[in-house]
Amino acid sequence: GAVVSQHPSWVICKSGTSVKIECRSLDFQATTMFWYRQFPKQSLMLMATSNEGSKATYEQGVEKDKFLINHASLTLSTLTVTSAHPEDSSFYICSARVPSGHYNEQFFGPGTRLTVL
Amino acid sequence: RKEVEQDPGPFNVPEGATVAFNCTYSNSASQSFFWYRQDCRKEPKLLMSVYSSGNEDGRFTAQLNRASQYISLLIRDSKLSDSATYLCAVNTDKLIFGTGTRLQVFP
């Protein structure tokens, strides 16, 4: 399958700081990437759809001013958690849709585990 | 009603057993369907897409019933390494996941 990378794989930060997470498609160009969040023992919840060259589309209940998404190129999307608080601690996972896949397969990055102290 | 629903399990089965998971979805306009496998503290990995005619990949068989709006995954001859959480996912304009079904295969 297609390869998607994420950086960092884990981060620990103090409350009130901002954290940037990068998502890269390594062997294909992704016009659309997705950001998910997963709390322990729960499923993946879609946060937003990141579109290259345009504004992200956020799901209901996700604050766009808190979770800033930038998709400046066809291989990179970033998620910035601004003024992080302990309740933002979670597993953040990005995915990218393979443009040539006729069945709209999505492949996931390895995830970023965020812990806010 | 949730968009995608699964029995959370856990399913505890012995090696060699056959186990089946079902997943229902509410949006009749859903276009494509998938099963993902997620190991503890890891990202989901695509196990198989689910086609209208049903499809098989080794010990794994996936089926789709559009009329009843459910998809299924059958695992034959379970291995210890099959222990994981199995997530169904349904795509319209975005991919929506079920809560996942936990499978534990014991010796």
Image (tube, coloured by chain):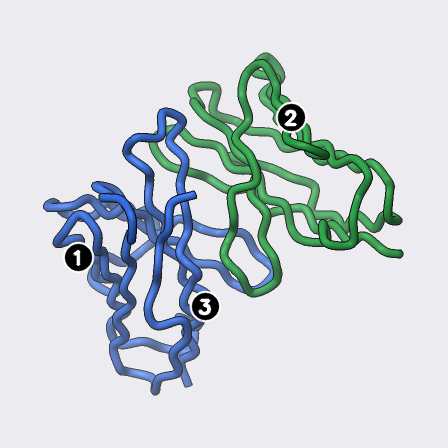
Chain colours: A blue, B green
Against A115, is A94 above or below? Answer: above
- Quarter of the image that includes the N terminus of chain A: top left
SS label for mark 2: strand
The image shows residue A65 at horizontal and vertical percentages of: 20, 62
Residue at image mark 3:
A90
Query: Circle 3 sits in a helix, a strand or a loop, which is it?
Result: strand
Q: Position of residue A63 (x, y in %)?
A: 27, 58
Which amino acid type is shown beneath numbered disc 1? Asn
Instruction: Count the numbered circles shown.
Output: 3
Chain of the residue under label 2: B
Residue found at x 34% / y 63%: A6
- What residue do we see at 58% from left, 53% from top? B38
What residue is pinned by disc 2? B56
Q: Disc 3 marks which amino acid?
A: Ser
Residue marked by disc 1: A70
The residue positioned 32% from the left and 38% from the top of the image is: A98
